[in-house]
Image (cartoon, grey):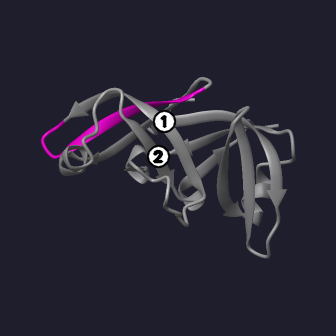
Amino acid sequence: MNISTRNKLSGTVKEIHTGAVNDEIVISVSPSLDIVAIITDNSTKSLGLKVGSNVVALIKASSIALATNVDDLLFSARNQCKATVTAVHKGAVNSEVQMDAGQGVKLSAVITNTSVDELAIAVGSAVTAIFKASSVIVAAKKA
């Protein structure tokens, strides 16, 4: 798959919670990390999703927020991945932050240079990548 989205996490559908309009799709991307996506019920059907389906979760790097020192905080965003920063590439305004969430899961976020500086993000920093379930696009192979 050729696509500009930096975050492409292969996984298996673990759970499907059907709603009147939207469905919650839980995707296991590693033994210890699940990603939650909210997609329309029509999309669930048109993709032919079932528990056990192989899928790819796509998340734009600009949809991922980074936080530090979050142990005493709760967030409404369903997806929260603890990770270690492996690279920071500063641009004129924004930086791309690359992370390792363990067990082969790599993530990238694009945040402002101001945020990088204020959060003191550097190689080796422990961060939490936070993104909403509605920011996850689910892709599946055609049957």
Q: Is 101 included in the stretch rendered in magenta?
A: yes
Task: Please give the residue where the numbered disc 1 appears in the rendered image.
Answer: 83
The reply to whether dot 2 and dot 1 touch (C-beta < 8 Å) is yes
Question: Looking at the picture, which amino acid does disc 2 mark?
Answer: Ala
Question: Looking at the picture, which amino acid does disc 1 mark?
Answer: Ala
Q: Which residue is drawn at 67% across and 60% down?
A: 39
Location of residue 4 with respect to 113 vertically, above or below: above
In percent of width and height, residue 32 lies at 70, 36
Horizontal side, residue 91 vs residue 76: left or right:
left
Location of residue 132 with respect to 104 vertically, above or below: below
Horizontal side, residue 91 vs residue 96: left or right:
left
- Callout 2: helix, strand or loop? strand
Q: Give residue 126's quadrant in the image.
A: top left
Task: Please give the residue where the numbered disc 2 appears in the rendered image.
Answer: 129
Q: How far apart are marks 2 and 1 (CA)?
A: 7 Å
- Callout 1: helix, strand or loop? strand
